[in-house]
Amino acid sequence: MSLTPLHVIIIGGGIGGLCLAQKLKATGISVAVYERNSSDVWQEGYHIRINPFGSQALYESLPSALWEAFLATTRKMPLDTEFLTEQLQKLLVLNRAKAHGTGDPVRAYYPISRIALRSLLLAGLEDVVHFDKAFERYESTHDGKVTAYFADGTSATGDILVGADGANSRVCKQYLPQAARVEIGVVAVFGKLLLTEQTRAWLPSQLLLMTNLIIPRDRYFMVNNPFDRGPVSDEALNRIYEKARAAGLNPDLLIDNTPDSLLWGFFAPINGHSLDMRSLDGHGLQRVIGQMIERWHPDVRRLVAEADPSSISLNSLKASTLICPWESTHVTLLGDAIHNMPPVGALGGNMALRDACSLAHALTAVKHSKLSLLPAIQAYEAEMREFSFAAARSALRRTEQMVMSNRIERLAFRTYFRICNAIPPLKRDFRQKWTLAAMRNRAKPASLK
């Protein structure tokens, strides 16, 4: 079989770009990653929740030693999601394992620190990743290649340029300017409560043991995610060190020393308070949210009040305009660069991993002369629009439903959740729709607005 030589330029060294580089290098395709930040920028960050889409992409993209190291370093993740009222009364409980099956580590849920995941994805790519390379623009060459130009005056030429440079993608702004990010009219405030002996003593069990979504009568909602490592045995630590060394990694980068915590996100209409919350610091946001939830359960109010103000930040949520199909060229995009979405459901990073794996499969077919380059890119983009655009719609719809609906509609939601919780067939149907939304909500590409 004749092989088609390829050189792939990836702009952006986030999880999607690095996952793509891992798979391409493993299949013998020449690849180079250009990251605008220096190598020591990512020293802290929140955890990321890997779902079955993301875990399968990692399994297919990582060398076996790195996959084993990934399994060794991840934390336990609550498999139940509970919908609650603002008084912590149960509306509905979903078990995600029942939706995806149990016992399959390839399609499972894993929480992992962003630092540990990036360390895994960078392993073995020392000759591939170039830091301090701020992308400025690209040009198509007369021989069908693409040249990327960087702020330091250097350039790089390849057969295909992949924009994996995140929500404010410069590649997308040049290539598909009509796919701009737009504000959705919602702000999200995130905070962190450390899980100590004292806080565990008063926190309700459902906040410690489950992911939960609090749906009040008002036009707000809150999502809580516990990241509780629990006791780590010497045997578990030795296993991590063993897997890390087998993968050629520094074990210290995989030991998750992040303190156990409960991460919360409070979502509200952008005009949901007389003050412009976007102008407030952590202390101000903490005070305003306390006022907005003053009639909620005392433990939820305490959860916000005792969070470290330095951990509290606000994002004015945006989402990409999901455009209709475009003519495929030697430039393509993945992840937030083309389908940035609200964080509800933790779908964004997982869809970036899935995009990366899908694009790698398409380019592998080109290498083995099963497809020529442009039809392969076209096939990847069609699949990406079908799956990842559906995930973006799902995240946007969930956010808008939980924030924009009026009181009567919200009471109807809550009644419906209670009915589903009481009737097993309805509960099974709801669980499938909620947990597999990115698979089930396929539709023709259309603008979010």
Image (cartoon, helix red, strand yellow):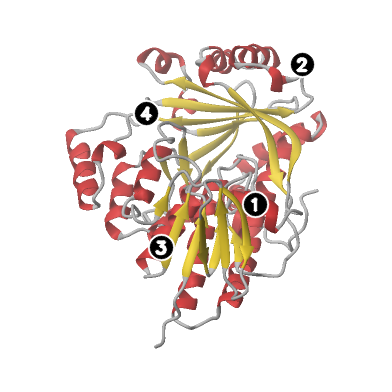
Secondary structure beneath label 1: helix
Q: Is residue 163 visible?
A: no
Q: Mark 4 — residue? A: 258
Please tell me which residue lies in front, 406 or 394: 394
Callout 3 touching callout 4 (CB < 8 Å): no
What is the CA distance from the residue labelled 1 to the residue labelled 4?
A: 30 Å
What is the CA distance from the residue labelled 3 to the residue labelled 2?
A: 48 Å
Secondary structure beneath label 2: loop
Please tell me which residue lies in front, 415 or 357: 357
Q: Mark 2 — residue? A: 275
Q: Earlier in the sequence, mark 3 or mark 4?
A: 3
Q: Amino acid type of disc 2?
A: Leu
What is the CA distance from the residue labelled 4 to the residue labelled 2?
A: 34 Å
Where residue 2 sits in the image (x, y, percent)? 41, 87
**Dot 1: few (<14), some (14–19), or many (≥20) neighbours within 10 Å?**
many
Depicted 73 relative to depicted 138: above or below: above
Q: Nearer the viewer, mark 3 or mark 2?
A: 3
Callout 3 touching callout 2 (CB < 8 Å): no
Secondary structure beneath label 3: helix
Where residue 230 sits in the image (x, y, percent)? 32, 29
Callout 1 touching callout 2 (CB < 8 Å): no
Q: Earlier in the sequence, mark 3 or mark 1?
A: 3
Q: Mark 1 — residue? A: 339
**Dot 2: few (<14), some (14–19), or many (≥20) neighbours within 10 Å?**
few
Numbered mark located on residue 224 in the image? none
Q: Earlier in the sequence, mark 1 or mark 4?
A: 4
Residue beneath the point at 55% across and 80% down: 372
Where residue 144 sits in the image (x, y, percent)? 60, 74
Residue beneath the point at 44% across and 55% down: 19
Depicted 291 relative to depicted 204: above or below: above
